[in-house]
Image (spheres, helix red, strand yellow):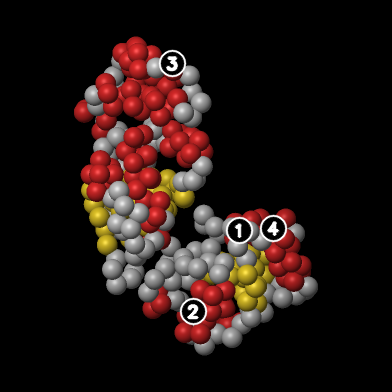
């Protein structure tokens, strides 16, 4: 009889958040697929769990996933964990779940802490409707295309970000979204947990050094409404259009999208854009 895959949430900081069921599951399975075995071994040692591990990360996910599925089909039970939080969410474990379903393998979840929901809950921004956008690409065209696709997004937006990339991300967000409210949530459940409630303009101006913030970061950004339309200048509208040009839009298309966002006239933006070129 085939085994099962257990998707197990682990603490995002405070080890006291580790659930009894998660401990029981990791102790009972035949092996654990861990994003970084060096990180997971500390958790296992803390709770006296002696289950063997295999590494499973973005660089070996496809081939290792096949190996894991074969072991499960041969009757072993496997638990997949990430370094912190829920695996398979903005995480290579997503592929393993897909591979299991393709093979008819049962997948079970053992819920645990997640930075996404935790950060949103204490952000102070609207939580009634939101969209999770994960990590922005380090590839500039892909990054700009992603941000461009969110220009008309009215829901609260949630992003994950690494501290060394924060300055560039805040700068890009301000260019595309304008001066919206943002909550920068860092070090969730840890001693130095903090929610920095500010605006994109202030944040972009303040956090210019890669070492200005440490720890894992969740960014909660206000969705569009009339935030820009009340205060936008022609200069800001043209700057937005220029960013859109870099995503592959024509000058006319960029001016049109900028006009929707800022409330200014498309023709004025288009003329100014051509004059700058």
- Residue 42: image x %, image y %? 49, 80
Density class for disc 1 (Cα within 10 Å; few <14, some 14-19, many ≥20) is few
Real-space CA distance between mark 3 and mark 4, rounded to the nearest whole angstrom: 43 Å
> Along the polypeptide, which appears first: circle 3 or circle 4?
4
- Residue 44: image x %, image y %? 52, 81
> Along the polypeptide, which appears first: circle 3 or circle 2?
2
Q: Secondary structure at mark 1?
A: loop
Q: Secondary structure at mark 4?
A: helix
Marks 3 and 2 in Cβ contact (< 8 Å): no
Of the pair 213 and 179, the residue shown nearer to us: 213
Q: Which residue is mark 1?
A: 58
Left or right of residue 53, residue 15 in this image: left
Which quarter of the figure has residue 213?
A: bottom left
Of the pair 37 and 150, the residue shown nearer to us: 37
Density class for disc 4 (Cα within 10 Å; few <14, some 14-19, many ≥20) is some
Q: Name which residue lies at 21% across and 28% down.
A: 231
Tell us which disc is closer to us: 1 or 2: 1
Q: Secondary structure at mark 2?
A: helix
Left or right of residue 251, residue 101 in this image: right
Q: Which residue is mark 4?
A: 62
Q: Which residue is mark 3?
A: 252
Q: Name which residue lies at 48% across and 23% down.
A: 249
Q: Name which residue lies at 51% across and 42% down.
A: 139
Q: Which residue is mark 2?
A: 43
């Amino acid at each position: 009889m085939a085994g099962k895959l257990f998707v197990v949430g682990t603490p995002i900081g405070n080890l006291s958040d580790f659930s009894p069921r998660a401990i029981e599951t990791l102790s009972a399975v035949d092996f654990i697929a861990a994003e970084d075995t060096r990180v997971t071994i500390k958790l296992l040692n803390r709770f006296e769990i002696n289950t063997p591990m295999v590494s499973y990360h973005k660089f070996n996910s496809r081939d290792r996933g096949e190996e894991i599925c074969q072991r499960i089909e041969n009757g072993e039970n496997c638990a997949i964990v990430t370094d912190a939080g829920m695996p398979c969410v903005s995480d290579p474990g997503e592929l393993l779940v897909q591979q299991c379903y393709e093979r008819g393998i049962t997948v079970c979840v053992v819920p645990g802490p997640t930075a996404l929901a935790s950060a949103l809950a204490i952000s102070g921004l609207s939580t009634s409707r939101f969209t999770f956008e994960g990590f922005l690409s380090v590839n500039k065209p892909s990054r700009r295309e992603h941000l461009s696709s969110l220009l008309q997004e009215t829901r609260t937006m949630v992003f994950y970000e690494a501290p060394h990339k924060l300055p560039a991300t805040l700068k890009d967000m301000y260019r595309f979204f304008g001066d919206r409210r943002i909550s920068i949530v860092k070090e969730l459940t840890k001693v130095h947990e903090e929610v920095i409630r500010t605006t994109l303009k202030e944040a972009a101006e303040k956090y210019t050094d890669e070492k200005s913030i440490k720890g894992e970061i969740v960014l909660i950004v206000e969705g569009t409404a009339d935030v820009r339309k009340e205060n936008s200048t022609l200069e800001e509208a043209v700057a937005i259009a220029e960013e859109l040009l870099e995503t592959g839009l024509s000058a006319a298309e960029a001016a049109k999208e900028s006009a929707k966002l800022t409330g200014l006239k498309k023709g004025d933006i288009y003329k100014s854009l051509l004059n700058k070129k």
